[in-house]
Image (cartoon, rainbow, N blue to C red):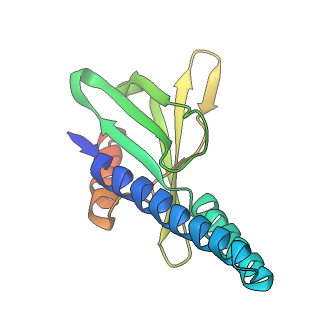
Amino acid sequence: MTISNKQKAVHLRRLFFLVSLVIAVAALALFLLDYTIYGIAMVGVFTLWFLYFQVIDYQFVEFSDANGKVVLRYYKAVRFGKTNFNSIEFPQPMLYSAHFDNSIFGKLSDLTLVVKTRRGVAEYPSVSLTALSLNERRLLQERLLQILGV
């Protein structure tokens, strides 16, 4: 089973940069037309727009459980500068637990995978599932619970 939100991540990235460009051009125009207060307000709007995307933490997520392995690839959908690509991969029997943390009435969701190693239990960093649809989140949760045997 493969779950991917690539198209939605691309859409969110384009939306962010397009709206950011419009806000920046509007702010520049306001400063050039000597409407300094309104230009500063547009900079404030851009700051709020940027902070929204940082707090919500939209991420590209691709989950696969083929060939007896759990593979989770992810990266931030909206980021200035170089994108850090991350991947989690381990055999299915090593999965010890999967924690789904929901907040803001289920709109924001994080996944934390816990695996059992020879030295004990290891926890991977949380992955934001906010950019996945509710149906995709439910499928992912069902599949991980099925792997755990719950």
Residue sticking out furthest to the front:
33
In the image, is residue 65 above or below residue 144? above
Residue drawn at 34 percent across, 57 percent down: 11
- Residue situated in front as seen by the camera: 119 or 100: 100
- Residue situated in front as seen by the camera: 50 or 86: 50
Q: Is residue 150 visible?
A: no
In the image, is residue 83 above or below residue 29? above
Indicate the position of residue 51 as horizontal and vertical percent values.
67, 65
Indicate the position of residue 148 as horizontal and vertical percent values.
37, 40
Residue drawn at 47 percent across, 29 percent down: 88
Indicate the position of residue 20 as horizontal and vertical percent values.
55, 63
In the image, is residue 44 above or below residue 87? below
Residue drawn at 67 percent across, 78 percent down: 30
The image shows a total of numbered marks equal to 0
In the image, is residue 136 above or below residue 118? below
- Residue situated in front as seen by the camera: 56 or 10: 10
Indicate the position of residue 8 as horizontal and vertical percent values.
32, 56
Q: Is residue 145 left or right of residue 66?
A: right
Q: Quadrant of residue 134?
A: bottom left
Residue drawn at 51 percent across, 79 percent down: 105
